[in-house]
Amino acid sequence: MMADAPLHFQTKSPTVLWQVLHRRSRTHRTKAIGLVAITFLFFFYFLQPSTKRVEPDFWTRFPSQFPFPERPEDAQVILPPRADINVNTTLPSGLDKPNPRLHVLVPASRGSRGVCRTLTSAMILGYPPPTVVGYRHESPGATESERMVERITRARDYLRNSKTVHDRDIVLMVDGEDTFFQLPPKVLVERFQSIVRSNNQKLRKRYGFAQVQDEKDDAPSELVQKYTQRVLFGASKLCYPGLLDDPGCVSVPESSLPPDVYGWKTDVYPDGSLNRPRWLNPGAVIGQAADLRLIYDEVLRLVDTHANKSGDHKALTQMYGRQEVVRELERRRTVSTFKEFMYYLVGISDATNLTGISVHLEAGRRYEYGIGVDFESQLFFSQNSSRKDVEWVKYANITKMSALQMQHGVPREHRLLLPEDIAALPNPFVQSRFAKESTQRPTWNATLDKLPSPADHSWLNISLMTNVHSATVPVTVHLDDDPKLRNVWWENMWFFPWARALLRKYVRDSHGFDAAQSSLLGGQDWLEVRGGRGGIWTDDESWITFAEICKGQERDLFDDGFGPWSKEHDNPDDPVYNQYGRLVAGKEEQDGEGEGEQEEGEDEEKID
Ligand SMILES: *[C@@H]1O[C@H](CO)[C@@H](O)[C@H](O)[C@H]1NC(C)=O
Ligand SMILES: *[C@@H]1O[C@H](CO)[C@@H](O)[C@H](O)[C@H]1NC(C)=O
Ligand SMILES: *[C@@H]1O[C@H](CO)[C@@H](O)[C@H](O)[C@H]1NC(C)=O
Ligand SMILES: *[C@@H]1O[C@H](CO)[C@@H](O)[C@H](O)[C@H]1NC(C)=O
Ligand SMILES: *[C@@H]1O[C@H](CO)[C@@H](O)[C@H](O)[C@H]1NC(C)=O
Ligand SMILES: *[C@@H]1O[C@H](CO)[C@@H](O)[C@H](O)[C@H]1NC(C)=O
Ligand SMILES: *[C@@H]1O[C@H](CO)[C@@H](O)[C@H](O)[C@H]1NC(C)=O
């Protein structure tokens, strides 16, 4: 409301002047004169004393300082391996100062096929045991919007009340029903931190610093960066529908990808499939617990009043837009009008688009949440309108990798190389030293534990889902387009042919020698403190085994005919089903134990 005046004044004046100059610059003589004039104006600009402005200070009018100063990019989640200590060394001091941990939150009320794929892929890739938020808390009569509010409330409450989640911990929250993990947590955390670090350098340049005076007035005032990025959401090619004149669709930053990355129709093709992803997608988010709490508190405040099924998506879109409007108002307040005008002339204006938006801002309310999106799908790939942008490729195939971008019509194409952070990962097929001697379950079985030889298969020649346009290998895939694609894409994932063996390896690795040694050292290198492998935690802190939550989903997860998880060779009478669900060995289960049966009647589509 109060923000209207500065908006209109500054967006219009450069346009008028530009037209004047443009018309004149038709002849060489006037061009030369124009050049002289511009030079003169530049000169004038540097001599110009800085003008004092009287506009309100938007940074304080809308509280923008973070209650919690540590930055996510500085959190020491991934510790370098400690080569200096072994089992015999006395424990080094300083172990009582725990480093921040990584938590994976998966909102889901039951172990459907989609949820089990999310959990299976997270475990295979070595994520800490996921926390399934709202498990077995389905309220049967609730409307979709009530469920959405309940889901977010539970997640927020977990972040607020759980004893295992600390303010500085990094939290990844993904849609339970339709997410696949592709790369390990180390890549996730390091990419997140590096994106945030580099964006924060840009934000520092763009918005500068603010002076803050401490409560005690004798303390010297401190300079803080005005605006920082603190959380990262997935990015979408389409904005939330129906918000045409909302800042969430108009004023959010442009993509960091080149403006022609989808060819000459980039950003203009009507169905949106050639848009550069730019808008907020709520299906995946990563950030520090305290920051996410602040965001979801506000989402809950906003959805309570006008909720519908995707009310959270709408609320987050609007929050992102308003954050950018306030940042821009503050920038325009402090920037030199003349410099702004010159940048506009030269065509390097980076002003946020505030044209035609309708927004109501209340003084005293926070609009700053440190929200940003993952433009290049380094972390989160979203399938909606993007399914043709990806391919599963082996980087060792140079012929293929050299031609790939050209085949997709990417301008200035070049050969895609395996990203360095992936090349540096350990081979995923190496069994731990003592796997074969382990007496704990799952005990070694040459058939069930068969993995390809690490000499033949490495990150270089397994199929990695690659976003050809942005040249990235995303950490997670959000399957928010046609549900029919989910089975095909699952079977395309690199781990699928060996999913059961890899999952067994993950469970076994948790109680081997290396784990014992690490626990002796206080579990410093663990990503999570609760421990447990081969199961999940619920938000009310109970432990549920994988066999229990995903009972009956084995065919869709592994498609290997080895039957139920964890009962593969316990009892020769245990039933074994082939990929079509037909009994191939053992005895059919008679009583069905209730739960397994329930899963059969799911409302989910079954495509075989
Ligand atoms: C630990 O100490 C024992 C007994 O002193 C010794 O046999 C063993 O080799 C040592 N292990 C390492 C890893 O140093
Ligand atoms: C949610 O509400 C908006 C209007 O506020 C409407 O345009 C949209 O279609 C609704 N979406 C659903 C899924 O009901
Ligand atoms: C700013 O947004 C308006 C409304 O969406 C749009 O018409 C206009 O083209 C945008 N301007 C720029 C420079 O992107
Ligand atoms: C490499 O890719 C090309 C083109 O897709 C394919 O024809 C060829 O068989 C591949 N080579 C290997 C070794 O996989
Ligand atoms: C992967 O590369 C290795 C070594 O170059 C080769 O022996 C092996 O056959 C390759 N495997 C596949 C599946 O392409
Ligand atoms: C893709 O995203 C748009 C905009 O958010 C949404 O309206 C549409 O339903 C999505 N498509 C699918 C298949 O979910
Ligand atoms: C290993 O598992 C397979 C498949 O379930 C089973 O047929 C076989 O008997 C098991 N082998 C041993 C040694 O337990």
Image (cartoon, grey):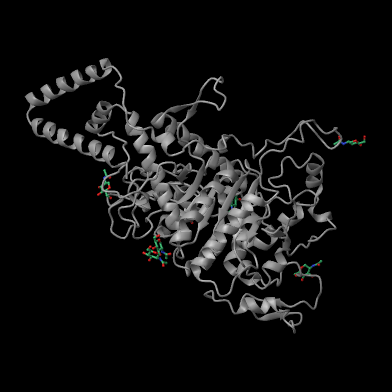
Q: What is the quadrant of residue 554 in the picture?
A: bottom right
Q: Residue at x 54, y 72 (%)?
A: 142
Quadrant of the frame with the N terminus:
top left
Q: What is the quadrant of residue 536 in the picture?
A: bottom right
Q: Is residue 468 left or right of residue 489?
A: left
- Tell me if residue 429 comes above or below residue 22 in the rendering: below
Q: Nearer the viewer, residue 576 or 384?
A: 384
- Tell me if residue 22 comes above or below residue 440 in the rendering: above
Q: Is residue 474 visible?
A: no
User: Percent from the top left, x then y, of residue 589?
Assistant: 74, 81
Q: Nearer the viewer, residue 49 or 78?
A: 49
Question: Splitting the image into four quadrants, where does ligand 6 fall?
Answer: bottom left
Q: Residue at x 20, y 20 (%)?
A: 41
The residue most toward the top is: 47
How many numbered discs?
A: 0
Q: Nearer the viewer, residue 229 or 217?
A: 217
Q: Residue at x 23, y 37 (%)?
A: 9
- Tell me if residue 493 comes above or below residue 365 in the rendering: below
Q: Is residue 445 left or right of residue 61?
A: right
User: Percent from the top left, x then y, of residue 81?
Assistant: 71, 36
User: Percent from the top left, x then y, of residue 477?
Assistant: 51, 56
Q: Residue at x 69, y 38 (%)?
A: 99
Q: What is the quadrant of residue 193 in the picture?
A: top right
Quadrant of the frame with the C terminus:
bottom right
User: Percent from the top left, x then y, of residue 462?
Assistant: 57, 53
The residue most toward the bottom is: 590
Q: Is residue 296 visible?
A: yes
Q: Is residue 55 left or right of residue 103?
A: left
Q: Is residue 126 left or right of residue 241?
A: right
